[in-house]
Every structure is written in C-alpha cells, then in structure tokens.
Amino acid sequence: MSIEGNLSIGDEWQAIQFIAAGQLNPRKAVAELIENSIDAGAKHILVVREKLRGETLLRIQDDGRGVDHCEDAGKFIYSDDIATNLSRIPTHICDSIKRKLDAQAREKVIGEFGIGILGFWALGQSFHLRSRTSRSDTYSLIMERQKRSF
C-alpha cells in the first residue's frame, strides 16, 4: 500500500520565520534591496547609512518605476494601484511575481524567489518601503521583525 500527495506548509508563519532566519547576511540583504531597484529600472541608486533622532537607518533611494506591477487572473500586468501592489509583497512570500514574466522579460530581472525582502531582519527591527509611479500617490509598506502583521 502506498500514499501519494503534495507537500504543503503546516504553519506558514513558522516557515516565514525560518526563511527570514536564513537571510542573516546584512550585505546580502542590502544587495537584494538594490537588485529590486535595478529590476524596477532604476538608473540611479543612493545608499545612505545615517542617524535620525538617535536611530541608525539605512536608506535606499532610486529613480525606478516603483512597485508598478500586480497579478490579474494569473498574469503579470502593470498597474498604478500601488496600495494593492505593495500589499502583495508580504502576502506572497516565496511567490515572486517576477517568475510570471515571459522569457524575454525574465532575462532583464534579477529576483525571482520572493524571499529577499525578509533580509531586512538582518539589518534592523523595521522596514519601510515607500513607492509611487509617475501617475500615483506615494504609499508605504511597513514591516517589523518578528511580527506577522504589516
């Protein structure tokens, strides 16, 4: 007698914590954030480590397109709905939208797994991502280390 089935995650939050714990190299975390800027078409990327009101922070600023894509009916589409686009990032860990690009577009991007964003756990306690497109308002995604909510 044999049993067949598919692997699945029993406790998603525990799996996310395990993945984040594997992203401990601060240099790799910074590289992942810079790669996201490059994937967004940035030509200029500014990386600054500074103190603000006694807190050390790392700021990465770019001139890319912003988080300008989402998924509709399983297809990759461009969208100025930044709030929806940003909310997809923490709700689709291990499911990068970049994998849904056609072969030609995939050649131009670096990221593909959807876990690099968790590298912020190696850098600090919180992560603030501000994004806009040329036709949208600015929206923020805030994530905190060891917290499931965003």
Image: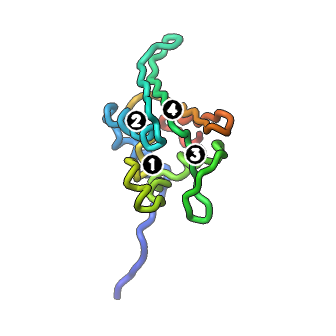
Q: Mark 1: which secondary structure?
A: helix
Q: Earlier in the sequence, mark 3 or mark 1?
A: 1
Q: Nearer the viewer, residue 70 or 52?
A: 70
Judged left or right of residue 92, residue 105 is left
Q: Residue at x 45, y 37 (%)?
A: 37
Q: Mark 2: which secondary structure?
A: helix
Q: Residue at x 54, y 31 (%)?
A: 128
Q: Which residue is mark 3?
A: 68
Q: Which residue is mark 2?
A: 34
What's the amino acid at mark 2?
Ile
Q: Mark 4: which secondary structure?
A: loop
Measured Cα–Cα span from mark 4 to mark 1: 30 Å
Q: Position of residue 59 (x, y in %)?
A: 47, 24
Q: Which residue is mark 4?
A: 63
Q: Which residue is mark 1?
A: 16
For label 4, the crowd category at 10 Å Cα-Cα, with few meaning under 14, some 14 to 19 and many 20 or more, is: some
